[in-house]
Amino acid sequence: MIKYLLMVNKQGQTRLSKYYESVNIQKRAALEADVVRGCLSRRKEECSFVEYKDYKLVYRQYAALFIVVGITDNENELSIYELVHNFVEVLDKYFSRVSELDIMFNLDKVHIILDEMILNGHIVETNKNRILAPLLALDKMTES
Amino acid sequence: MALKIVKGSIDRMFDKNLQDLVRGIRNHKEDEAKYISTCIDEIKQELKQDNIAVKANAVCKLTYLQMLGYDVSWAAFNIVEVMSSSKFTYKRIGYLAASQCFHESTDVIMLTTNQIRKDLSSPNQYDTGVALTGLSCFVTPDLARDLANDIMTLMSHTKPYIRKKAVLIMYKVFLKYPESLRPAFPRLKEKLEDPDPGVQSAAVNVICELARRNPKNYLSLAPLFFKLMTSSTNNWVLIKIIKLFGALTPLEPRLGKKLIEPLTNLIHSTSAMSLLYECVNTVIAVLISLSSGMPNHSASIQLCVQKLRILIEDSDQNLKYLGLLAMSKILKTHPKSVQSHKDLILQCLDDKDESIRLRALDLLYGMVSKKNLMEIVKKLMLHVDKAEGTTYRDELLTKIIDICSQSNYQYITNFEWYISILVELTRLEGTRHGHLIASQMLDVAIRVKAIRGFAVAQMATLLDNAHLLTGNTQRNGICEVLYAAAWICGEFSEHLEDPMQTLEAMLRPKVATLPGHIQAVYVQNAAKLFATVLQKHEGETDSQAAQETSQLLIDRLPLFVQSANLEVQERASCILQLVKYIQKLQQKNVDVAEEVTALFAGELNPVAPKAQKKVPIPQGLDLDAWINEPPSESESEDEKPKAVFAKEEPKHYRTKHTEVDEKELARRREVRKQEQASNPFYIKASPSSQKVYDAPGVEHIPVVQIDLSVPLKVPGMPMSDQYVKLEEERRQKAKSERKKKEKKKKREKRGKERKADSGPESEEDIAPAHQVDIVTEEMPENALPSDDDDKDPNDPHKALDIDLDKPLADNEKLPVRTHRPEVLKSPADDRENETVPLETKKKSSKEKKEKKDKDRKKSKEEKKKKKKRKEVDEPPLESQLEEAVQSEEIQEVAAPPTSTSAEASDLDFWLSTAPVPPATQDVTAPPSAVTVATSSAATPDSEPEEPKETEPEDTKLSKHKKKKQKKEKEEKEKKKKKRHHHHHHHSDGGEDSVQNGTVEEEEEEEEPLPPMSNYSLLAENTYIKMVYDIQGNHQDESKVVVSVIFENKSDSFLKSMEFNVLDSLNSKLQRPEGAGPHDSLTVPFQLPPGVSNEARFVFSVQSIVMPQKLKGTLTFIVKSEDSSTHEKLDFRLHFTCTSYLITTPCYSDAYAKLLESGNLKGTSLRLEGIIMPFHHLLARICFHHHFSVVERIDSCSSMYSRSIQGHHVCLLVKTADQTISIDAKCDEPLLLGNLLDEIKQTFSKC
């Protein structure tokens, strides 16, 4: 099961955070900082899985942006690794060449996309068109 | 008002939106905190406005700030406001904020129950979706309880988009409200075969997660999953299923055998690394569970290891890491297969990536054997020297110690080597693990008696060179080893060559710079050494030297007496006085050595860490009993101490003492000795039995000349290396010797307390260099062998360990709407309390629940009798067709045993006959697809949908179905029964929501059901048949939901179905926003031939006191192979007054209050010639007219129901001689009149 998904930039600023297990708001900041430190300190040639406390982190770097996913040990690391890429591809498709700013300015929309893909800590949808369907419907709604 | 709105929207133009906020924060890098606090002030202003758009914008910004770590819990109520906006664009912002900010203790959550329920049942799928998503983040036990039933209903929604979400949320609901698992499980199981792969995947996910924690309850699903595994092409789903199998196989080894083949096929064929990895993992798990009894699995293991080797050799670090991870799992059971890849693993120690190196280290831990231990440790020691960064080096250090000490030093053949390794490790700079090395030194020296001489010599050298260890303040961690060194030298001082020198080393002034606890050990052990030295000198009658020794102590100890450390000071002053006294005696030429030695006589044995816990409680000892009765409250405080101390205790003591006389003591001693002699765990003072083993081994001990003059710390002279060479030579020698002595009887060489050898076979040949006795740790006598249960009592999954195969009991059904806050309108005052989720009231609500359960049971029992009788009574009254239906029912009832055993035997069958033709278990096998579709499509909502018996239309339906099935009936009979059974199960859960404990539908195993349904025929032609049911909407007093089941009777495909109704003034079909009042609604599905499905339409009604009929039309396209035609079917929707009633339970006291209030007006009705049992009659009223039984006394019963607009309807039903009189009261006479007419009609049909 997925515990949380974070998007953090190289400066350690959180750009998106989604928790699938309740984590105290006070603890979130500390956790995020700690997790990011763990991932930022790793070199490119090191593997993308980090053992962290009693669970694992899977992270992927896209330019200056890190996507870090906390998973329980019964989750398949590689499938999460692929999921992260899938997520970025969906973002790319919707924002056409997504950038950090897109994510910041459209936090709510990124959340919609994410919610379509991961629910309750489980992968629900991986098909790009189906993931984007509600968002496109929403966009139409706001236009009209 | 209008002005206000205009003003609001103008304001809005100047408000910051999210983008502005983000930009602003970026532009205020220096004073970000200040900027944000002004933003928060603005947001607070915005939230005060009435305009929902402004509020939503503010909440959106708050969500962003929350992500940055600002507490926004103060806005919780505003978030709820935005959530309840009717516009989706705002609503979703509210839900997003809620899902980010709310947690279980957010108190406004309890306000959201109704809103969420409303959104869940919204006709807009995105409303439902957003509510479900939000719910997954902040569901509380209360919400879970209140909404479980709604979410369960959504699991059968027409849209897969909703279904898949609902299925996943159910997992959270189970966790928060475990009681929901059993009622919901049948439907969850059903979703495994959902036509939509997404829903299927969601169900697989949930069941995997459930099964991971409590696998045994899900074993019966194995055949189904097996089928999914072989048919699914979605890798994400496959991974989950395979994972699930990994959890199941330990419980059912036969399953494992079945799995190996498809899994190995997947391993061979898949190109997806994640899937490959998962398969390998599961094959490993399977093989572990099979570990014995399957000889030909070595091929599978080889395949796995091979594939893993490829992963490890890959340049992709991720694969390398995972390969090592999986390899470590194989290692546990098949160490040999892994050991052959030692080269590869050792290579990974040089990897750039620390996590890979650590994984490799883990692997090495399991790969060591007697043969290769020295070699591996040598490699690791090299890495220790090379390692950069203390964390990795410390990790190496602990790993070396772990590897060597594992399973009671199983793999160490030469302890001298190990001591040398430990001594070498003390040279590590700045390690944190000094205490670890120290404890190893102590452990080895204490437990391996043969090594003590060597250990003491090494420790003495360490003490002598202590300055090297303590010189650098950075190395403080390592000085812990001096603690061990001092203790070993003191305790085993008899082995010291030159105790005087060591004593001198231990009393150097520099020692005072060591940490207190080490100094304390120094002082204490100096005394021990002193005793040894004295003895030595007195033995040699060298009184001069003995006195010099005393003088040395007297000179040096004062330094420690001044120590700031209490322990050091106390010990030092004590020993100093002792030595002074000894010195006096020495001056009088008295021999003191013997007495001084006696101070430290006796052996210290290691005690097992769990020993204390394992001491059995002697019989008759009650640990909870008071030793002294607590003083009574009335006693004054002054009296207490007297009573406790002065009076009672001394007496007590004396009596005890006098009881035991000398003889008795002697006898007891004897008994104890006897007992100790026969106790293997008791370590005797003279280990005679062990010495026997020592003797024959002596010849094998190589004479190792250890050159102690070589300073330990000379760089480049690692001592342990000597042993590696020596060991090789020794083994060579032993080998050749063994060849000579082949005829000689083989001797058991290992100490008897060593663990049984489980390493590779050749290990047997390696004789340990020393015959070592590893002393086991002491345990108390009669220690209980019980294993500790380390299970976490707080694990939420514990609550989900529920037997799912057991038929549902009545009290297990999901709580229904009556438990929920909106019932506040109901007359039952006490229920108001129940619904307010306050801590203090929980207890009372529980009591009520119990009470209710009792009520339910009562009515259930009634039903039982009634139904049985009905079975006997009815057939003659029914038409022939119905008889046929019923006979089928009866057959069904007779055939299946309880579902548990049925499922268990199914599984057995599936597992035993190896190549099972999939069709036998395959519920959705092609021929039966049609019927399955009907059954699943007919059950999407909470409506009861048993095949109807009382109304002719439905009988036709079942007849129709039967016709369809006839062809396959014979071969499918067995299967069909199963399906039916399943189906009933399912409807049980669904029905509950409507019936609310009034008409308790029983499990069919227990009680055959007279099928009843509220679905009545809407219209029918050659192509299509429509049946419908109308239910009041619980949230909205002006809405009813019409559920229509469309059944395709033709052989063609029906599509583009459009449903339209001519609205009346009073009743209107709810159309989506923007649609005109005459537009028709598209039915959201198409119907393949023979399939039926259900759609729901919401109608708004104004007045509910009169029944009404609405004309409507269904248009559709019939598409056959060559043509397509437009067809049209007219129908009339009949809104009865009954359909506006909602089953609402009522407690008798509230009911009485209601009647007393005098607001209700009465009418009565008499029905004659009704020949049916009274409870049967009540059931009909309950079922068809949505009433609930309040109280029943013999042939008289009070009933209650409530309309969607809050009218109370009370009935008093009496029966006597086939005559039924109904006295009815209601606050709306017109409604009541119409209702009674409808009731009359129902019974006139009978």
Image: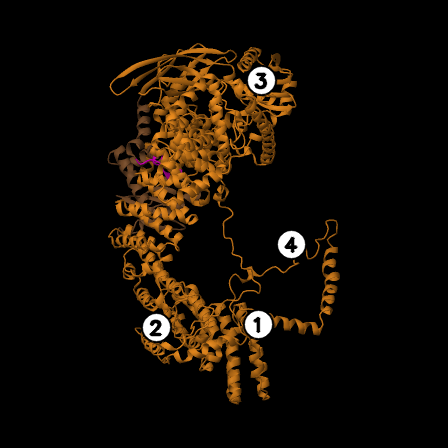
Chain colours: A brown, B orange
- Residue type marked 3: Val
Label 1 marks a residue whose chain is B
First in sequence: mark 1 vs mark 2? 1
Point out the stretch of residues depicted in magenta: A115-126
- Residue type marked 4: Asp
Q: CA distance from mark 4 to mark 3?
A: 58 Å
- Work out whether residue B827 or residue B600 is closer to the camera in this orientation and state it: B827
First in sequence: mark 4 vs mark 2? 4
- Across and down, in percent, residue B1141 comes to 52, 19
Residue corresponding to mark 3 = B1209
Quadrant of res A141:
top left
Residue corresponding to mark 1 = B677
Quadrant of res B818:
top right
- Across and down, in percent, residue B225 comes to 38, 40
- In contact (CB < 8 Å): disc 3 and disc 2: no
Q: CA distance from mark 4 to mark 2?
A: 55 Å
Residue corresponding to mark 2 = B720
- Quadrant holding the C terminus of chain B: top right
User: Nearer the observer, disc 4 or disc 3?
Assistant: 3
